[in-house]
Amino acid sequence: MALSTADGLALVRAHGAPERWLAVLVTLRADGLPSVSVVNAGILPHPVTGVPVIGLVARGATAKLANLRRDRRATLVFRAGWEWVAVHGLAALAGPDDPLPGFDAARLPVLLRDIYAAAGGSHPDLAEYDRVMAAERRAAVLVTPERFATNPPGTEHQEPA
């Protein structure tokens, strides 16, 4: 059963929020094998197109960014209990080493804050947050959903009594 973008994003919200917006990110290594990491990610409008995307913040020198620079395909899996939803799509990057066409690089600190907030984060000192993000050359990863996968209807699991 194919999910519409609206229905898929509704499942992401339903599964992401209770689990503190933790997701598994899958990218592809140069040898074609999957690379997996746990990330905080949330839904927000793409800073150029306004289309809803799944955003996360990645440290500048990470395998996930190297993988996405080479192959933009990404999958994020959110779960709540036994229920899950996978989001497949192409990633766009915005960061000090990854200019995003149509995006004013001076707005990167605001974008990183927006992603952090969308993923359930809050910080008592945003100036310090901005300083750390810049020092670590953090980049925004923006995955535009192309398709979703989830538990088939009728396979909902019950927690053991």
Image (tube, rainbow, N blue to C red):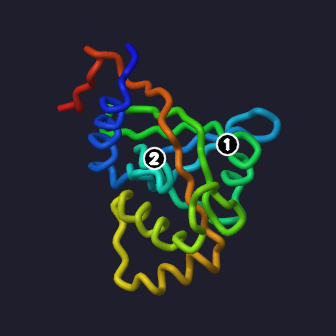
In x, y percent, where is residue 26? Answer: 60, 40
Residue at the farthest right position? 31
| Residue ID at (55%, 83%) | 131
Q: Quadrant of the N terminus?
A: top left
Q: Determine the secondary structure under disc 2.
A: strand
In x, y percent, where is residue 73? Answer: 64, 36
Q: Is residue 22 visible?
A: no
- What separation in Å lies between label 2 and label 1 (alpha carbons)? 18 Å
Q: Nearer the viewer, mark 2 or mark 1?
A: 2
Q: Which residue is mark 2?
A: 54
Badge 2: residue crowd in 10 Å (few <14, some 14–19, many ≥20): many
Number of numbered discs: 2
Q: Is residue 73 above or below residue 125?
A: above
Quarter residue 95 falls in: bottom right
Q: Amino acid at mark 1?
A: Ser
Q: Is residue 55 left or right of residue 11?
A: right
Q: Is residue 29 visible?
A: yes
Q: Is residue 110 above or below residue 4?
A: below
Residue at the farthest left position? 161
Q: Which residue is mark 1?
A: 35
| Residue ID at (53%, 50%) | 142
